[in-house]
Image (cartoon, rainbow, N blue to C red):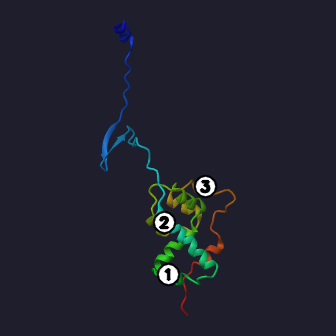
């Protein structure tokens, strides 16, 4: 009886056109159209990026409330270079959705702190394009304009010696 049941079972064969290639020491499935079968890597929470963004907002607040008069004073108090302070404090001008993505670990996997430390547009739509986040202007948060707070730009100047 078992032989009769086994003879009536059909074997279904499925052919999937793909190849396996080594990329970076790992095997990757390459589909016929050239795309990788593996999903794009997901970004994870980057503590150094979060720390830099937090520093930027803290330093911005210290400038706004008058604790420090300029970036050079922050640099002296923190015992770091004024150039580093100026590059980090610009992160306070990032679009709110970019900051939220960084804090939640949902930024693109390719985005690094090194990328954020490079010059970037002040306009939020330009930032989204440069950092490949969201869909440009349409990615704005509800009720948020497409640019930074005006007051945020005023205090980013370095001390001027007279």
Q: Do the numbered discs 2 and 1 sit on residues whose CB atoms are within 8 Å?
A: no
Residue 51 appears left or right of 145? left
Q: Secondary structure at mark 3?
A: helix
Mark 1 or mark 2, which is nearer the start of the sequence? Answer: 1
Figure check: 83 above or below 91: below
Q: Which residue is mark 2?
A: 116
Disc nearest the viewer among 3 and 1: 1
Q: Residue at x 50, y 72 (%)?
A: 88
Determine crowd level at label 1: few under 14, some 14-19, many 20+ residues with C-alpha closer than 10 A.
some
Residue nearer the viewer, 30 or 84 = 84
C-alpha gap between disc 2 and disc 1: 19 Å
Tag 2, which secondary structure?
Answer: helix
Q: Residue furthest front?
A: 1
Q: Position of residue 54 (x, y in %)?
A: 54, 68
**Residue at the disc numbered 1:** 75
Query: Which quadrant, please, contains the C terminus?
Result: bottom right
* Residue 142, horizontal then vertical, whole percent: 68, 56
Label 3 vs 2, first from the N-terminus: 2
- Closer to us: mark 2 or mark 1? 1
Q: CA distance from mark 3 to mark 2?
A: 19 Å
Residue at 59% in and 75% down:
60
Image point (39%, 39%), residue name: 33
Tell me: 7 left or right of 123.
left
Residue denoted by label 3? 139
Residue 73 percent coordinates (x, y): 53, 84
Label annotation for residue 109: none
Number of numbered discs on residues: 3
CA gap, disc 3 and disc 1: 35 Å
Q: Residue at x 32, y 39 (%)?
A: 20
Q: Is residue 152 above or below residue 138?
A: below
Instruction: Estimate how packed mark 2 is, as few (under 14), some (14 to 19) or many (20 or more) residues with alpha carbons within 10 Å.
Output: many
């Amino acid at each position: 009886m078992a032989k009769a049941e086994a003879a009536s079972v059909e074997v279904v064969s499925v052919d999937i056109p793909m190849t396996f290639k080594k990329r970076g020491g790992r095997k990757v499935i390459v589909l016929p159209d050239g795309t990788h079968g593996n999903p794009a890597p997901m970004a994870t929470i980057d503590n150094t990026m979060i720390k830099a963004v937090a520093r930027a907002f803290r330093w911005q607040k210290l400038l706004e409330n008058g604790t420090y008069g300029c970036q050079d004073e922050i640099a002296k108090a923190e015992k770091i270079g004024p150039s580093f302070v100026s590059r980090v404090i610009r992160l306070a001008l990032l679009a709110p959705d970019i900051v939220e993505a960084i804090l939640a670990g949902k930024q693109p996997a390719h985005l690094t702190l090194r990328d954020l430390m490079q010059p970037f547009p002040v306009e939020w739509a330009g930032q989204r394009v440069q950092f490949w986040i969201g869909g440009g202007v349409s990615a704005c948060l509800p009720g948020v304009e497409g640019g930074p707070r005006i007051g945020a730009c005023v205090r980013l100047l370095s001390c001027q010696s007279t």
